[in-house]
Image: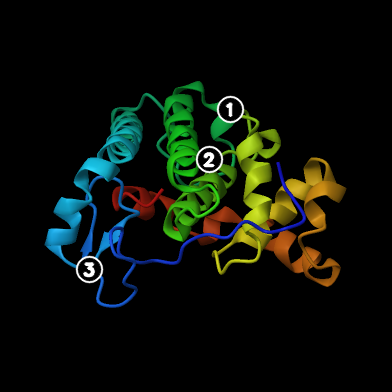
Amino acid sequence: MSSPDPIKLLPRACGLCGEKDDLRRRCSGCRVVYYCEHKHRVLDHMFHWSACEKTKEARRIMEKERIALWDMVHNGSVPNDLFKDGIGYFGAVPLTEPYILAKYQLANTLLLLFGGPGGRVDAVQAALDCFLRMFQLNRGDRQDVRSSSSVFDLSDYINLAILGAKAFLAAVGRLMVPQRVKRFVRRDELGQLESLIDTEPDAVDFAGAMRNNEV
């Protein structure tokens, strides 16, 4: 639930000592925690392991569904133009639902494990990227992302330099409880921000992005 006082998140820093410079290693499991040296990664393992494994599993399931969906494009189970003309209308193709749900679960896992007060900005950024991509793929929002508690919690992060946060909140506010969410976005920015969400998806190479595990 959003609050008048924005939640403070930790900037990118070593997961053990808090060092902000020379972050040489990123956890290959969760992909949102960084370390300044291998020794610190080892020392933090027992504290980080549980959240890391849950995030890693959510990411593994999403990757599995991504590959399965791409395979269905190749074998004709879904339209071969799905990642061109079908962008924005994935909800009309039932076989796309497992992938969309897996992406939604990954975003929620990141927010639950790493995104609370004092959490990590990289985790919130990654979750927001998932939600934004879901809106681009499935404008109908069959998973009801716009009204989920995770979405409203994101409004507390508007003070941070999180790419796309204001545009995301503008899109949510346009359709669901606008007064509650739009108060985080300046009125003169709304038109510009909403247009960012509504930009024609054909301008983006989603097929290429999916091959590179970016969708």
Disc number lying in front (3 or 1): 3
Residue positioned 20% across, 63% down in the render: 25
Marks 3 and 1 sit apart, C-alpha to C-alpha, by 46 Å
Q: Between disc 3 and disc 1, whose residue precedes?
A: 3
Q: Rate crowding at label 2 as few (under 14), some (14 to 19) or many (20 or more) other CA atoms within 10 Å.
A: some
Measured as percent of width and height from the top left, residue 160 is found at: 59, 66
Q: Between disc 2 and disc 1, whose residue precedes?
A: 2
Measured as percent of width and height from the top left, residue 122 is found at: 43, 58
Name the element at disc 1.
Answer: helix
Q: Rate crowding at label 3 as few (under 14), some (14 to 19) or many (20 or more) other CA atoms within 10 Å.
A: many
Q: Which residue is mark 1?
A: 92
Measured as percent of width and height from the top left, residue 146 is found at: 68, 39
Q: Between disc 3 and disc 2, whose residue precedes?
A: 3
Q: Which residue is mark 2?
A: 86
Give the total of numbered labels. 3
Contact (Cβ within 8 Å) of mark 2 with mark 1? yes
Q: Which residue is mark 3?
A: 36
Q: Tell me the kind of residue under disc 1.
A: Ala
**Residue 18, above or below 156:** below
Residue positioned 35% across, 32% down in the render: 69
Marks 3 and 2 sit apart, C-alpha to C-alpha, by 43 Å
Residue 46: tell me if it is visible.
Answer: yes
